[in-house]
Amino acid sequence: MPSSSAEITALLQAWKGGDALALERLTPLVYEHLRAVGRRYARREFQARLGATSLVHDAFIRIVEGRNVDWQDRAHFFAVAARIMRRILVDAARARMSTKRGGRMRRVDHSSAIDFDRLPAHETDRAAELCALDDALDALAQEDPRRAQVIELRFFAGLSVEETAATLHVSPQTVMRDWKLARAWLGVELRR
């Protein structure tokens, strides 16, 4: 990202303070990162119906509507964006599987650890895997909120280890340890 973290943080603070021009200047600085995350989802064929552009637009609209957020910095912004994108993706998967649309949600048995490099395609039962992942992440958040945040930041927001560490105020080594332990915990949880 060509703009500095300090510049984005300053614009977030100005926007929080009511400066509408700050939002106009902020949008092109953060939108490209959000689009890259959305393209990653589309490339993994998860949201052919929703589409990367729609995912990013929906997330950005929700971010803009959430004017009362106490923006801390660039990493906090992308953490919030990750949570919103996760909700959009899971809601879309649950809607596709709902009984009123002719689908049926069911628990999926997983024989191996979760593949964090591929999201489920909408035309397969793998949409149920995203819902199961969401449920497992919620359960992990009850046991260990920071590890759940590491998964959310790295997987859903596409943040690097260093950006995740800065967001959570921990070392990169702690992020990697949490990443490995959370993935193992989720793998066990999803196999249940």
Image: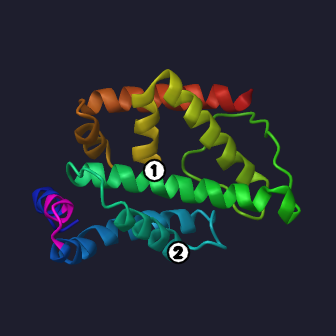
State which quadrant residue 15 falls in: bottom left
Question: Which residue appears at 86% of the width and 56% of the height?
Answer: 99
Most foreground residue, 41 or 11: 11
Residue 82 percent coordinates (x, y): 43, 53
- In the image, which disc is placed on residue 67? none
Question: Which residue appears at 60% of the width and 44% of the height?
Answer: 115
Image quadrant where one finds the C terminus:
top right
Q: How packed is label 2: few (under 14 Cα within 10 Å), some, or many (20 or more)?
A: some
Instruction: Give yes or no for residue 167 being in the magenta stretch.
Output: no
Which residue was labeled with disc 2? 54
Image quadrant where one finds the N terminus:
bottom left
Q: Mark 1: which amino acid?
A: Arg
SS for callout 2: helix
Q: CA distance from mark 1 to mark 2?
A: 16 Å
Residue 18 percent coordinates (x, y): 18, 66
In-image side of 100 versus 82 (left or right): right
Q: Mark 2: which amino acid?
A: Ser
Give the extent of the magenta segment.
Answer: 12-19
Most foreground residue, 179 or 147: 147
Which residue was labeled with disc 1? 83
SS for callout 1: helix
Residue 108 percent coordinates (x, y): 79, 40
- Main secondary structure of the magenta stretch: helix
